[in-house]
Amino acid sequence: MSKYMNAKLLPSGYRPQLSKQSVLIASDAVKRFVEDRLKSDLNLLKHPAPFAFEASSKINDDLDGSDAHKAVRFHISNITRDRGVAPPTTEAEKYGLEAEVVQSLANWKRVMLQWYGLEVGQGLFCESTSIRKGYKGDVTHSNIADQWDWELRIEESQRTIEFLRGIVNKIWRIIKDCEAMVAERFGLEPTLPDKIHFVTSEELHATWPDADIHGREDAAVNKWGAIFILGMGWPMKDGSAPEEIRSPSYDDWLLNGDIIVRHPVTGYRHELTSMGIRVDADALKKQLAHRGMNDLATKPYQAAVIRGDLPFCIGGGIGISRLLMLMLKTGHIGEVQVGVWHKDHHAQAKAAGIDLIPDRIL
């Protein structure tokens, strides 16, 4: 049997703490709990999630901008039909367009805040699913990304690190209370620290200068249990690469970050959410210039930000399957999510005590 994944990535001596059916029941309980708290604690309304965007609008998230991580594209013919009658196959296509599968809803949600006329302190969240065709798989990554995409309208005066920290603490309290609910209902022992530790990307780089990005984050979560890394996107002061490359169009790279914890089963860094205060006109222009992407400034979404047409806001994405992995103490994302894995990896995982949910007959 060939090995798709380095065996060192699979948890050693793993045994699931819940049965397959119990995982389904607990997953539903976690999702209901978190969604109820997003509604109450952050004052968010649940909204249907789009599956695709018109490609030329540039409203989609381009992630790190690399070719490997480009969105999945497809063509929509947009040939109309009369009621109950299929159109002739020879009908000319006049309204066809190119569409992209959603990467994240970061930019679109900001537009929706405006479209619905939401006030400061009100917001939206969606349960979104996207395809990440270029991502490399491991026990916490697949080619399917599911998350609660959320957005909250704020005042311009709230574009501060202090306000960001306050929202992070609210989300952390939701996560901690969810863990307590799972412990009470399903008997799984809590492992997360009561408080989250804030650290800047510069501090991480200075503390562990010889480690790579994930090595620094591993060291940090082993020390503190749970961290929020402040400031993701700009290069380090010494000129080295940023903690993570980010799209220039949504987060202000000085006012964003990630919640990362230590997973009790894998023993590795476990990213739960990326979030940030969104760009204003000044931040967007600086970030586009830094990335050599000034041509985007004339695209509909970016131009609207530069004109000041869109509301100030904060938002992010909470990984659904990642949170389920953490709450239910599973050793692989494929135990809580239906991914597309090679048959050899199904066999490899099975030998390690991991039953990946299948997408086909194996």
Image (cartoon, rainbow, N blue to C red):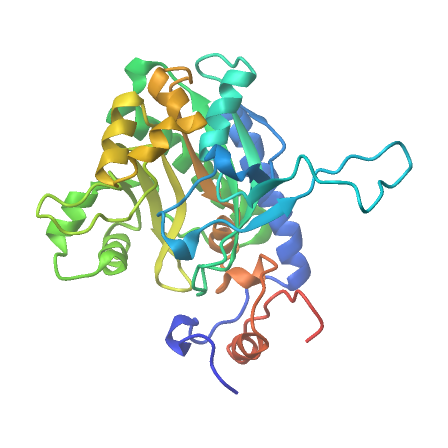
Residue found farthest to the right: 84
Q: Which x, y percent locates residue 6? A: 40, 76
Residue 356 sits in which quadrant?
A: bottom right
Q: Looking at the image, is 14 positioned above or below residue 222? A: below
Q: Which x, y percent locates residue 124? A: 53, 26
Q: Residue at x 46, y 41 (%)?
A: 318
Instruction: Depth check: give the residue in front, 333 or 99.
Output: 99
Q: Residue at x 51, y 60 (%)?
A: 333
Q: Residue at x 36, y 52 (%)?
A: 66
Residue 29 sits in which quadrant?
A: top right
Q: Looking at the image, is 100 positioned above or below residue 142? A: above
Residue found farthest to the left: 238
Along the horizontal axis of the image, is 268 left or right of 59?
Answer: left
Instruction: Depth check: give the residue in front, 33 or 116.
Output: 116
Residue 15 in view of the camera = yes
Q: Looking at the image, is 264 positioned above or below residue 44? A: below
Q: Looking at the image, is 206 positioned above or below residue 196? A: below
User: How many dots with numbers?
Assistant: 0
Q: Which x, y percent locates residue 191? A: 40, 52
Along the horizontal axis of the image, is 195 left or right of 3?
Answer: left
Instruction: Depth check: give the residue in front, 8 or 132.
Output: 132
Along the horizontal axis of the image, is 85 left or right of 159?
Answer: right
Residue 198 in view of the camera = no
User: In which quadrant of the rendered image does the C terminus lie?
Assistant: bottom right
Q: Which x, y percent locates residue 330? A: 51, 61
Q: Residue at x 47, y 76 (%)?
A: 4
